[in-house]
Image (cartoon, rainbow, N blue to C red):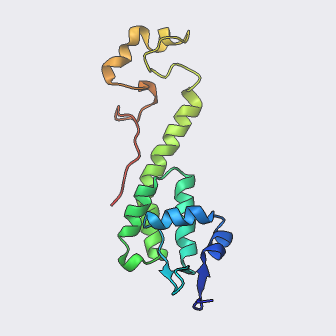
Amino acid sequence: MDIEPGELTVGQLAERSGVAISALHFYERQNLIVSRRTAGNQRRYKRDMLRRVAMIRIAQRVGIPLSEVAAILALLPDNRTPNRQDWARISECWQAELDRRIVQLEQLRNDFQDCVGCGCLSLDRCGLANPYDVLATKGPGPQRLVDSGGNPCHPGSCR
């Protein structure tokens, strides 16, 4: 088997990371992880790819799009795996986005059973919270579930 010390096969990476082999292949096609190919065209991953896969899974779990993960990883030289300082910068970059998402989720939890200001006027509470759809003047969408700037909450990016 053509494997260097500290390298993992795709099966080993999948087993240790808890990610399906097909997902690892997808991550590689998206340039999120990298491998080298053996003479027999088999993938071999450096062991530190486990950290990259863990970071990808964490980002996905909190709703950060893979395109943003790829953009962050692309800033690292030579497809290097994030080190402690890189991770601190990435975490700081995503902090504002995660704070916005927390506000959205709390607002959704607290207000979703009430009128959200979408304009349907079908709930009995809409007549009080949004009489005659006055919130339509503020823009499209559920106006009672938008950020404090009056804009629907959209995922941000940090470059």
Residue 112 left/right relative to 157: right
Q: Position of residue 54 (x, y in %)?
A: 57, 66
Residue 58 vs residue 83: left or right? right
Q: Position of residue 155 (x, y in %)?
A: 41, 46
Q: Between residues 148 and 117, which one lies in front from this camera angle?
A: 117
User: Which residue shows up at 47% across the image and 70% down it?
Assistant: 87
Residue 133 occupies quadrant: top left
* Up/down of 119 relative to 111, above or below: above
106 w.r.t. 40: above or below: above
- Image quadrant assignment for residue 50: bottom right
Task: Give the answer, above or below, for where 80 lies relative to 23.
Answer: below
What residue sits 61% from the left and 66% below the top? 21
Q: Toward the viewer: 159 or 7?
A: 7
- Quadrant containing the C terminus in the rendered view: bottom left
Against 96, residue 37 (above or below) is below
Q: Nearer the viewer, residue 44 or 111?
A: 44
Examine the image and state in which quarter residue 149 appears: top left
> Residue 84, percent across and down?
49, 75
Residue furthest to the front in view is 40
| Residue under the image location 47 percent in, 11 percent down | 121
Q: Please give left or right for residue 108 compared with residue 69 in the image.
A: right
Q: Position of residue 30 (x, y in %)?
A: 44, 63
